[in-house]
Image (cartoon, helix red, strand yellow):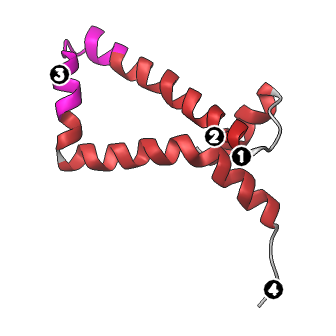
Amino acid sequence: MWWGARAAPAWAGVRAGAGALLAVGVLALVFQQLADLSVGFGLRGMTLAEQLRYFATPPGYIYAGCLALFAVMPLLRARRANEGPGEPP
């Protein structure tokens, strides 16, 4: 996730504006969720309701948190890169 958060905006030619970076993350999340739903439907035979019910379980909460982190990672990665290494202690 850390590497992709830098590589995807660079590959797409997106400059470091917060809105643009957030859009990259949200678009990546949409594509990831389309793939996840496709696997659930096609390979696992799950319905949309079954897939959505998963989010109401403790593992689903963790997964939702990871998805939120996935969406904002390009923005977090860019901010971290702009901070630099910082002052040594």
Q: Is residue 75 left or right of residue 70?
A: right
Q: Is 56 positioned to the left or the right of 83 in the image?
A: left
In the rendered image, the quadrant that contains the N terminus is top right
Q: Are marks 1 and 2 in contact (CB under 8 Å)?
A: yes
Where is residue 46? Give x, y as percent. 19, 16
Task: Please tell me how crowded label 4 is: few (under 14), some (14-19), or many (20+) other residues with Cα within 10 Å.
Answer: few
Prevailing SS of the magenta stretch: helix
Compare marks 4 and 3 and give the one earlier in the sequence: 3
- Residue highlighted by disc 1: 18
Q: Residue at x 49, y 25 (%)?
A: 30
What's the CA distance linking mark 3 and mark 1? Answer: 34 Å
Q: Which amino acid type corresponds to the residue marked 1 in the rendered image?
A: Ala
Q: Which mark is residue 22?
A: 2
* Tag in front: 1 or 4: 1
The amino acid type found where label 4 is placed reads: Pro
Residue of label 3: 49
Residue 51 locus on image (x, y percent): 22, 26
* Residues under numbered marks 2 and 3 in contact, where contact means CB atoms less than 8 Å apart: no
- In the picture of the structure, the residue carrying the numbered disc 4 is 88
First to last magenta residue range: 38-53
Q: Determine whether the residue tagged by mark 2 lies in a helix, strand or loop.
A: helix
Instruction: Reply above or below: 78 against 39.
Output: below
The disc labelled 3 sits on which kind of residue? Ala
Classify residue 28 by image quadrant. top right
